[in-house]
Amino acid sequence: MNRLASLDIAFNPASVAIAGVGTLNGGKAYLDSLLSAGFQGRIYPLNPKGGEISGWKVYPHVQDIPGPVDYVISCVPAAQVPQLIKDCSEKGVKVASLFTAGFSETGREEGRQLEREVQRLAQGGGVRIIGPNCMGVYCPRAGLSFVLDFPKESGGVAFVCQSGGNAIYFVRCGARRGIRFSKVISYGNACDVDETDLLEYLIQDTETKIVAAYVEGVRDGKRFRQVLRKLAARKPVVILKGGTTPAGARTAAAHTSALSGSDAVWDALLRQAGAIRVDTMEEMIDMVVTFLFMRLPLGRRVAMVGGGGGASVLAADVCTANGFALPPIPPEVGSEIRSHLVTDAGAVLTNPIELNMYPESSYNIARSLLAYEAVHFLLVNCVVGQHPWPMFDAWFDIVCDTAIRVRDQVSKPVAVVLPSDIQGDDQVFVTLQQRYYEAGLPVYHSMSGACRAIDRFLRYHKRPTSTDEIG
């Protein structure tokens, strides 16, 4: 079986066995996650003691399972993994995912030797290995998950991640911003299946439209570069490279035994391949949100509406620092806006402009700004927490209604900044964020995050890269 066909089985198994299932351990968590995700195939819990758990028969060994097994999840101690791989080989298992840690990432020679033994046994027995030291596969369409609260709906974003914790963080945070996933895989130490295999698989995966990746290091730089170039020629690829500093590189080696490499080399490699490099998990989420929901602006001139005076001043500074221009409102546009005001008390007709408490007036103001030919897109600065009294909660609904209505009626892009510093359990924030993304609007948690993402988006599409280039 070729490398890509085996990965297809990992994402679409007909049967899954979980080795090391107990009453309260990682194996039980995997079982619960599969059941919660709606996996429709056959599930076989494994434990040498046999018995029953949560109404499921527990088999002592892989060989005791009556039917074929495609995919095995290992939650047994590291010393037991070699025997498990032998059993998988005899059973004809195609793929084994090793949640089990205690291998090369320990930095100890015995851990490295054990990993090499597992690799040798797997290669000799025709079993592909994901991991060790990983969370494995999340594929909502197939009902595969390693966490209970992941979305059950599928989408077009794939995430290839060397870290299990970062995979969980990305899915949870991304889901709150409207991202839905085709495939997510945490691949850990990559003793067999590595980032290059996974990226190569995603080239031909029709379900995946956007690819994000967190990589700490690669073992075959030449092949990685070739595959990445092919993938980036077909789909947007956003990459976060971990271990860019000496301290980070040491931590990466201890985390997944990854060889990080020179940061300058990585920067050149990703740029030449056509991938978009980001520096934080938040930037990666911002970038994916932009590709999913942002219409492509024709340039860098911004009209901004929303927040109060101080917030608007700071937002204008951030926009300008990131290469965007906020054109002044000319007299004829100002006159049109003024005609929509219910009252002009306190109205300052500049760009940015603060929306008022009157829904139709706010809509007409935003519509007039977008109709102005010197404006390429609209930024809605919705600063939850800046108003002093509860009565102003209605203002946020008006701003939200305005953004959604304008977005539905004009061709120019609309993006929303909903700062996250105050979110906590604030129901206003939670409700607004959901309303925006359900309407298909890109939502960002800071003005700087929005500007960085839209800047990279424009550069990716080779739009003007500075205000000087747009006259």
Image (cartoon, rainbow, N blue to C red):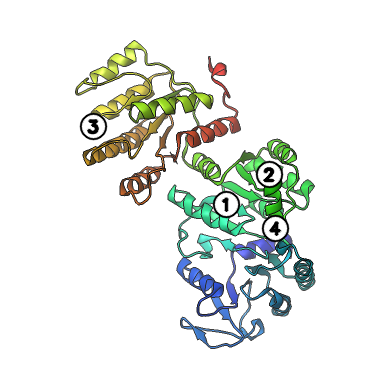
Check if mark 3's residue and mark 4's residue have beta carbons within 8 Å: no
Q: Which mark is residue 208?
A: none
Q: Nearer the viewer, mark 3 or mark 4?
A: 4
Nearer-N-terminus badge (1/2): 1
Task: Determine the image quadrant of residue 316.
Answer: top left
Can you say whether 50 is above or below 142 in the image?
Answer: below
Residue closest to the eye, 120 or 139: 120
Q: Amino acid at mark 3?
A: Met
Q: Amino acid at mark 2?
A: Thr
Q: CA distance from mark 4 to mark 2?
A: 14 Å
Q: Amino acid at mark 1?
A: Ala
Badge 4 is on which residue?
254
Nearer-N-terminus badge (4/2): 2
Nearer-N-terminus badge (1/4): 1
Can you say whether 334 is above or below 25 in the image?
Answer: above
Q: Which mark is residue 158?
A: 1
Check if mark 1's residue and mark 2's residue have beta carbons within 8 Å: no
- What residue is shown at x 41% (from left), y 39% (from top)? 419
Left or right of 294, for residue 158: right
Q: Nearer the viewer, mark 3 or mark 1?
A: 3
Q: CA distance from mark 3 to mark 1?
A: 41 Å
Total number of numbered labels? 4
> Considering the numbered disc 1 on the image, is that residue within a helix, a strand or a loop?
strand
Q: CA distance from mark 1 to mark 4?
A: 26 Å
